[in-house]
Amino acid sequence: MPTALIILAAGQGTRMNSDRPKVLHEVAGAPLLAHAMAAADALSAERTVIVAGHGAEAVQSAALAVDPEVLLAVQAEQLGTAHAVAQAAAALEGFEGDAIVLYADTPFIRPGTLAAMAEARARHSVVVLGFEPADPDRYGRLVMAGDTLDRIVEFKDASAAERAIPLCNSGVIAADCRLMFELIAEVGNDNAAGEYYLTDIVGLARARGLSAGVVVCDETETLGVNSRADLARAEDAFQARARAEALDKGVTLVAPDTVYFASDTIVGRDAVIEPYAMFGPGVTVESGARIRAFSHLEGCHVSRGAVVGPYARLRPGAELSEDVRVGNFVEVKNAQIAEGAKVNHLSYIGDATIGAAANIGAGTITCNYDGVFKHRTEIGAHAFIGSDTMLVAPVSVGAEAMTASGSVITGNVPDGALALGRARQENKPGLARKLFDRLRAQKAERKRD
């Protein structure tokens, strides 16, 4: 059955105490909205509709950045969840299939759970996602009649007996798309909050003689984010899941609780991640690579057998081929480093290409920015760049060429050549002692004054 997703992202999130729309706050380097939208990929959804409200323009821009084909709707007034879903009707006009309603501030529902809801639709007209929390608190309750869901009661409207029910409502609902909008049209707001509740469609469906069912998930999947404290808990929950999945896939995490992944981090089996490694968005680490302690990676690719760190930083566009070494306090940005090359100490490699088996000495800097434009540095295979070399781009150093330590290289170096770009050293016998004597005398005189 074709599936459409309706993701509600209209809430202001006043408890976040932020100018930014709640759903644009990030977990694992990605907005909450992007996490919810990932469900579209898992379900191969034919259409995804984002219902924005507070900060609609920013929310819509973020949604389009994730998926340019996403459909957009706006809930100008926040009158309840049924009212919010109703705003998606125009975007789904003519759609034949199921619709699943998700919430951008409840971003961690597993693909398998959504697949189970889609499967349950073969048995029930409406399917609700439920869970049994350790503390039911103020969640709406799912009132069952045997194996069938009879109705959903919001906490504000529930009796004492209904509040004692342990099975709670996550808010996620699946139904035939056309039926969902028919039922929403019948929803009223005669309740304690005066809102149009999407949950009322269950009772309306039952009144038509239609069946309703429940799929139960773990409480961790339904974690909602309404405050900064919730955001921190969501980050913890994501990281715990990501670390467990990495371990299960054969990745060695030396100290799992100290490693932080982004939402899209890919790490191959037999890779080793040492303590306090931090991954930003867009990182792939191939099998057998090693990321050493206190390294920060984002927007980069690390190939098999490469070693990064400790205390290294890989920025967007860094491409490390097999068996590359990037050592302590090295930063690489928008640079391709070929197989077996080494950049081991205290260097900046930006906007550059490093050839196979080249050796970059300590303190080397590619001077890539002239204040307006960025320029590239090309270093050939088996080249040797002496320590403390300044490579003033645009510049190239040929294959098997060498630069002398302390050089400032402003012109191209041919293959196999040695380049020296430094002033001639001169020694002045006895001058150091004379200078020190003079300086010490000046210091003593200042103390007397």
Image: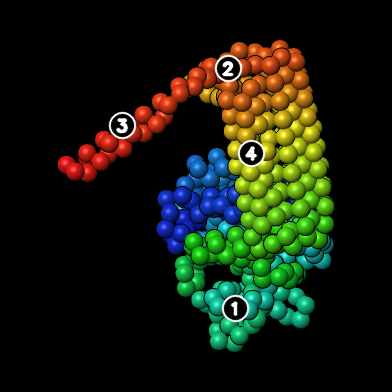
- Colouring rule applied to residues: rainbow
The reply, left or right, for residue 347 in relation to residue 430 is right
Residue 136: numbered disc? 1
Looking at the rendered structure, the kind of residue marked 1 is Pro
Q: Residues within 10 Å of mark 4 (few under 14, many from 20)?
A: many
Mark 1: give few (<14), some (14-19) or many (20+) Cα within 10 Å.
some
Task: Kindly identify which numbered label has been placed on residue 438.
Answer: 3
Q: Amino acid at mark 4?
A: His
Q: Quadrant of residue 209?
A: bottom right
The first of marks 3 and 2 along the sequence is: 2
What residue is shown with label 4? 345
Front: mark 1 or 4 = 4
Q: Are marks 3 and 2 in contact (CB under 8 Å)?
A: no
Name the residue furthest front: 430
Question: Based on the displayed image, in which of its 4 quarters is residue 105 positioned?
Answer: bottom right
Q: Mark 2: which secondary structure?
A: loop
User: Which residue is pictured at 80% across the width and 37% down the height?
Assistant: 322
Disc 2 + disc 4, Cβ < 8 Å: no
Name the residue that disc number 2 marks. 421
Q: Earlier in the sequence, mark 3 or mark 1?
A: 1
Determine the image quadrant of residue 391: top right
Instruction: Identify the element where label 4 is drawn.
Output: strand
**Closer to the N terminus: mark 4 or mark 3?**
4
- Tell me the element at label 3: helix
Say which of 149 and 111 sits in front: 111
